[in-house]
Image (tube, rainbow, N blue to C red):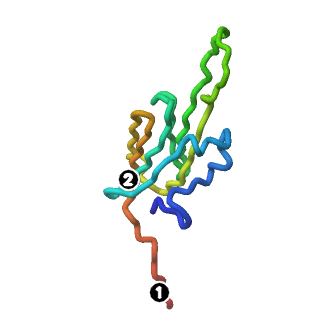
Amino acid sequence: MNIIPKRYYLDDFFDDFLTTSSSTKNAMKCDIYEKGGDYHIEMDIPGFEKKDINIETDNGYLTITAEKKDEVEDEDKNYIRRERTYGKYQRSFYLGDLETDNIKAEFKDGMLKLTVPKKEAVETKKTIEIE
């Protein structure tokens, strides 16, 4: 099986349905490329720690969720402007039938790096003899 759907590499099908705000996709920008027989996803998740990030696979989809709780506000602070947001951000990608047990993840300096190994191609074409 191939990670590449017919239309795009790693379909972002769920982005429009599972986002918590319109800025979710902008908050979790990523690059996806193929190298050394594996697929690589590099995603920017600034302002989060490793413990805030959850990665799951289910029914051919890889879902990355980052959640940060709002800090307790100090009542002595009179905010002039508050731009840092808290909440839950999520991106999903269609992987299809891949080696999900061997996916490797690394998080450092606000960047999540995933390595998704390709599965050996299985010949699905069969010729039928006519009697």
Q: Quadrant of residue 6?
A: bottom right
Neighbour tally class for label 1: few under 14, some 14-19, many 20 plus, Cα within 10 Å: few
Q: Nearer the viewer, mark 2 or mark 1?
A: 2
| Mark 2 vs 1, N-terminal side | 2
Query: Which dot marks residue 117?
Result: 2
SS assignment at label 1: loop
Q: Nearer the viewer, residue 37 or 101?
A: 37
User: In the current view of this chain or complex, which residue is farthest to the left?
Assistant: 36
* Image position of 10 (left or right of 123): right
Q: Amino acid at mark 2?
A: Pro
SS assignment at label 2: strand
Q: Residue 76: image x %, image y %? A: 65, 8
For marks 2 and 1, give the CA distance: 36 Å
Q: Amino acid at mark 1?
A: Glu
Of the 4 image quadrants, the one containing the N terminus is bottom left
Query: Which dot marks residue 129?
Result: 1
Q: Residue 55: image x %, image y %? A: 50, 39
